[in-house]
């Protein structure tokens, strides 16, 4: 099978070629409107960005999708789920405040905002999938209830997944807090006691209080550790690390299985748009935005998340890497840019495993509009 992926580049010479016009034409060309019917409660699934981050998808761009959904007579709402780690999106109140601060106000986006897994991330339904790692997955209640869904994704790097695209947005982004923990259980960190200076920052950052200080060193209670990585991001000495070879492939596979569960629950009722701009090395979950690793490329859309991410991955790798960014290698066109940042992570495993379990097809036909 070969899936169609529609692509629009960013060069513009007249008002009809500006980015907002391109998003509208891309939506139509990819047939995303055909997925949506009169009166459908339609989730626009996106990432509002952690407070301090500024490379999430521009609300003005999101408005173009909202307007297209409204043209079909449907009822769109913008949505995401609460985070596993402590931060500005760990509960629905803080999450909504962060979204509004980042410009996702009704006057800008033209749609209401709903945090899909409830006030503190405990609202979900379960879907049977019977896969290698997981028998069931948890999906946020309001996303499961939505009749249709358009997934808007900022395509960028990710420290444990290699890259964050449509697959990760489905998997992590549609899961409640306990579902995120299901995926992260493969990534429980280890303490290098020789490097640990006993500062206690990891214990302060841990959302489940799984870290305590013993004899001046960090100690992890693995029965309570959910593998969120907050301690690794906080440790100033780099004393927290992973078994990269053993943990990361399993984490990626769990993540892809979650994406499979979402698509199973919403079979034939989901469309995707990837934004290949501000292609940063790390996720928008971080409270900062690093320099992009390649130039801006364009926007892509498809009904197949695996094909869409495969095409996005290839387009990024086809670029000349930007000097002065976090790229350490793989600067040349054709080289794996995300490996150039995250040398121990094979991001392409998302695509291979997604195809293997029937999430989508890695073979695609790129159609430029």
Image: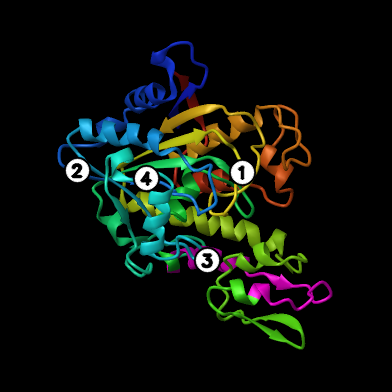
- Which comes before the other along the chain, label 3 or label 1? 3
Q: Could you say which quadrant of the image residue 148 lies in?
A: top left
Outermost residue, bottom side: 215
- C-alpha span from label 4 to label 3: 22 Å
* In this rendering, the label closer to the viewer, 4 or 3: 4
Pointer 3 with pointer 1, Cβ within 8 A: no
* In this rendering, the label closer to the viewer, 3 or 1: 3
Q: Which residue is mark 3?
A: 85
- C-alpha span from label 3 to label 1: 25 Å
Q: Which residues are magenta?
A: 178-202
* In this rendering, the label closer to the viewer, 2 or 4: 4
Instruction: Report the disc number at residue 40.
Output: 2
* In this rendering, the label closer to the viewer, 1 or 2: 2
Query: Callout 3: 10 Å neighbours few (<14), some, many (20+)?
Result: many
The answer to whether residue 279 is seen in the rendering is: yes
- C-alpha span from label 4 to label 1: 32 Å
Residue 53 drawn at (x, y percent): 54, 49
Residue displayed at 28% across by 31% down: 68
Q: Is residue 136 above or below residue 71?
A: below
Residue 330 drawn at (x, y percent): 76, 36
Under circle 2, the secondary element is loop
Residue 132 drawn at (x, y percent): 51, 61
* In this rendering, the label closer to the viewer, 3 or 2: 3
Query: Callout 4: 10 Å neighbours few (<14), some, many (20+)?
Result: many
């Amino acid at each position: 099978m070969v899936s169609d992926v529609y692509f629009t580049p960013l060069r513009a010479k007249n008002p009809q070629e500006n980015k907002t016009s391109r998003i509208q034409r891309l939506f139509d060309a990819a047939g995303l409107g055909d997925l949506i019917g009169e009166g459908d409660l339609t989730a626009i699934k996106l990432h509002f960005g952690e407070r301090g981050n500024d490379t999430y998808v521009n609300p003005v761009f999101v408005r173009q999708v909202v307007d297209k959904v409204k043209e079909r007579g449907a009822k769109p709402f913008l949505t995401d789920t609460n985070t596993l780690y402590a931060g500005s999106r760990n509960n629905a109140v803080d999450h909504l405040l962060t979204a509004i601060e980042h410009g996702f106000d009704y006057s800008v986006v033209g749609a209401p905002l709903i945090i899909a897994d409830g006030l503190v991330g405990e609202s979900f339904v379960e879907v049977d999938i019977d896969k290698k790692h997981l028998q069931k997955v948890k999906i946020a209640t309001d996303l499961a209830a939505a009749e249709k869904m358009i997934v808007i994704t900022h395509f960028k790097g990710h420290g444990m997944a290699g890259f964050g695209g449509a697959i990760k947005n489905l998997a992590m982004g549609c899961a409640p807090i306990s579902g995120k923990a299901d995926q992260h259980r493969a990534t429980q960190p280890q303490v290098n006691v020789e490097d640990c200076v006993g500062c206690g920052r990891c214990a302060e950052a841990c959302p489940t209080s799984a870290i305590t200080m013993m004899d001046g060193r960090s100690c992890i209670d693995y029965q309570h550790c959910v593998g969120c990585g907050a301690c690794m991001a906080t440790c100033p000495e780099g004393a927290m690390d992973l078994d990269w070879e053993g943990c990361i492939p399993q984490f990626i596979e769990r993540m892809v299985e979650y994406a499979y569960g979402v698509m199973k629950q919403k079979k034939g009722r989901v469309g995707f748009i990837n934004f290949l701009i501000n292609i940063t090395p790390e996720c928008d979950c971080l409270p900062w935005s690093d320099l992009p690793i390649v130039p801006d490329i364009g926007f892509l859309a498809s009904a197949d998340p695996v094909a869409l991410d495969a095409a996005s991955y290839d387009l990024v790798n086809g670029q000349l890497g930007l000097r002065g960014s976090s790229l350490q290698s793989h600067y040349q066109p054709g080289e794996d840019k995300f490996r150039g940042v995250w040398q121990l992570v094979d991001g392409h495993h998302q695509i291979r495993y997604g195809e293997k379990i029937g999430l989508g097809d890695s073979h695609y036909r790129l159609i430029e509009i």
